[in-house]
Image (cartoon, rainbow, N blue to C red):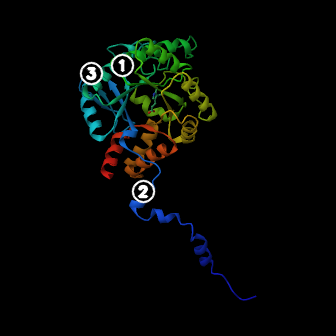
């Protein structure tokens, strides 16, 4: 025995010597240089709720900072988005009247059709995307036509979805986004668009949409909560991930130009899986109303630093594999990103 006793701290210092990841975190410039994921205003899509009437800006109680807006206010909105570097909007219409078959959803003078034209008139650069679903337009609040038992009829609904997509395309929409989780919806919409000479209109499919409680605030904003029952007969079970790849593959086969996973935060594993399985298609993730409301509520209480949390959340969604993030935080985030640069 030599009596030599190693200093435990020395041993630690020696073993850490060659591997010190902290070297690359020492200064802001080094951190910028090695950052793996970027977040920019043109990665963001801003959702908007459009209502009939004039000069209406009606705040949505469960989504602070979000309002329903009338079409005449959209030109100012387009200017603001342009100045922030945001390149795309996703439009939802809240119709003047609802009925069992959602007829206003495909009316040429419907609220979304007017909104599309207003945006296209205000800015030829802005990408106009539209949600294609019946739930905001039906008096029962379901995403399709119903049978006598209240079950959403699949193939009968596809025909209506095709008409909605064509009416949006005719009004000038660049991208239509079917969100109703009907089987065959992408193929039906693609065929309807092509038949009407609307080959230029792209389809971004809400391919993987879960039956989520995080849509709660949206249903206030869009006034589209189901009057009875729920959406579990068509939206996916939150427990399933492999099934997401099946849904995505079907939509790719039917001609989807881009895919979406929704919601985002509880489903980042699914975002990653779809990104890896379909690397050639742009992937969007929807940072939904409930995710937004949680951050806003905590920030309003002073429990979270809103700016830091929002940028962290959006970066995390991008890191998981999303090319685009649909988010109600888009305008705030774009403003903060501009300040930072
Ligand atoms: C259906 C639709 C919904 C959302 C987007 N499109 C609601 C639903 O499926 O019940 C939810 C978006 C959000 O929560 O932010 N048209």
Q: Nearer the viewer, residue 3 or 306?
A: 3
Label 1's element? loop
For disc 3, the marked residue is 53
Which of the 4 quarters of the picture holds residue 80? top left
Q: Percent x, y for residue 120?
A: 29, 25
Q: Percent x, y for residue 26?
A: 44, 65
Q: From this view, report whether residue 53 is shown above or below residue 268.
A: above
For disc 2, the marked residue is 33
Q: Which badge, 1 or 2, comes first in the chain's sequence? A: 2
**Residue farthest toward the bottom in the current orientation of the protein:** 2
Label 3's element? loop
Q: From this view, report whether residue 326 is shown above or below residue 9.
A: above
Q: Percent x, y for residue 22?
A: 50, 65
**How crowded is the residue under tag 1: few (<14 C-alpha within 10 Å), some, or many (20+)?**
many
For disc 1, the marked residue is 95
Q: At 46% across and 48% down in the image, what residue appears?
A: 37
């Amino acid at each position: 025995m030599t009596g030599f006793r190693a200093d435990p701290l020395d041993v630690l210092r020696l073993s850490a010597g060659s591997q010190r990841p902290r070297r690359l975190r020492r200064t802001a410039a080094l951190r910028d240089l090695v950052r793996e994921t970027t977040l920019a205003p043109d990665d963001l899509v801003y959702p908007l709720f459009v209502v009939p009437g004039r000069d209406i800006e009606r705040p949505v109680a469960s989504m602070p900072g979000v309002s329903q807006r009338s079409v005449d206010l959209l030109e100012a909105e387009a200017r603001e988005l342009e100045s922030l570097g945001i390149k795309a909007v996703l439009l939802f219409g809240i119709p003047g009247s609802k009925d069992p078959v959602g007829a206003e959803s495909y009316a040429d003078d419907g609220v979304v059709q007017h909104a599309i034209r207003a945006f296209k008139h205000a800015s030829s650069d802005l990408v106009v995307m539209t949600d294609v679903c019946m739930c905001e337009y039906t008096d029962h609040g379901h995403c399709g036509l119903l049978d006598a038992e209240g079950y959403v009829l699949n193939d009968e609904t596809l025909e209506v979805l095709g008409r909605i997509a064509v009416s949006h395309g005719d009004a000038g929409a660049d991208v239509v986004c079917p969100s109703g989780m009907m089987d065959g919806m992408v193929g039906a919409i693609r065929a309807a668009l092509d038949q009407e000479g609307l080959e230029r209109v792209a389809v971004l499919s809400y391919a993987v949409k879960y039956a989520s409680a995080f849509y709660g605030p949206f249903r206030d904003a869009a006034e589209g909560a189901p009057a009875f029952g729920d959406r579990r007969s068509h939206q996916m079970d939150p427990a399933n991930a492999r099934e997401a790849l099946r849904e995505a593959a079907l939509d790719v086969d039917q001609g989807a130009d881009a895919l979406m996973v929704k919601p985002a935060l509880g489903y980042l594993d699914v975002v990653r899986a779809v990104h890896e399985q379909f690397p050639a298609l742009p992937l969007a993730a929807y940072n939904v109303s409930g995710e937004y409301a949680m951050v806003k509520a905590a920030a309003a209480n002073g429990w979270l630093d809103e700016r830091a949390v929002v940028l962290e959340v959006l970066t995390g969604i991008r890191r998981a594999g999303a090319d685009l993030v649909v988010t109600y935080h888009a305008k705030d985030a774009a403003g903060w990103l501009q300040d930072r640069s």
